[in-house]
Amino acid sequence: MVIFNRKKMNTIKDIYDSLEKVMDPEIPVLNVLEMGMITDVQQDEKGIHIKMIPTFSACPAISVIKQQISDTVSKDLQLPVDVTVDPAIQWNSNRLTETAKDKLRGFGIAAPPIHHGEINADMLLHVTCPHCGSDNTFMRSPFGATLCRAMHFCRQCGMMFEQFKPLT
């Protein structure tokens, strides 16, 4: 049983430090901050309030991520935590940090390119292999392990890999 000290005030940095521990369940090398999923953090006399956005509107992991955020921050900071989905902001792939893109490549997933609100076929079809860096690749399927990824094949190294799709 956790006993909360509602009078304890943390800095916003304390809350963000705790959020760094919450990993995406589908890409466990990325945390929710690197994914650009956190839109607001507040603390008041009732506890900590965190707003988040899913990376894909039909993401099946939303409830898991919300629970992981609540459990981790509550345990670290000994306060009740309320996590809600922010209806005012829609996630897009430009929210991924550069660190996230580097980690994706290290994990064997091609990072999405920066876009300016418009996705074209070239962004989906011409993808650099995260294994060998070759541009001699082709899309095998627009659908990967999750809705936000596509399957590609590298003619240079012979590896299959996923691309995190650019999303607006």
Image (cartoon, grey):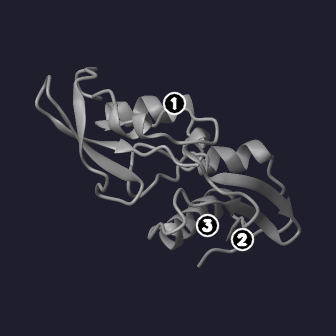
- Extreme residue in the left direction: 158
For disc 2, the neighbor class at 10 Å (few under 14, some 14 to 19, many from 20) is many
Q: Where does the N terminus fall, quadrant-wise? A: bottom right
At a point 55% along the width and 46% down the height, the residue shown is: 35
Q: In front of the other: label 3 or label 1? A: 1
Instruction: Residue 125 in the image: state x and y as whole percent.
Output: 34, 37
Read off the residue under disc 2: 80
Q: In front of the other: label 2 or label 3? A: 3
Assign a secondary structure to mark 2.
Answer: loop
Assign a secondary structure to mark 3.
Answer: helix
Q: Is residue 76 left or right of residue 146?
A: right
At a point 64% along the width and 44% down the height, the residue shown is: 17
Amino acid at dot 2: Pro
Instruction: Residue 38 in the image: state x and y as whole percent.
Output: 66, 53
- Which residue is more in the foreground, 11 or 54? 54
Q: CA distance from mark 2 to mark 3?
A: 8 Å
Read off the residue under disc 3: 70
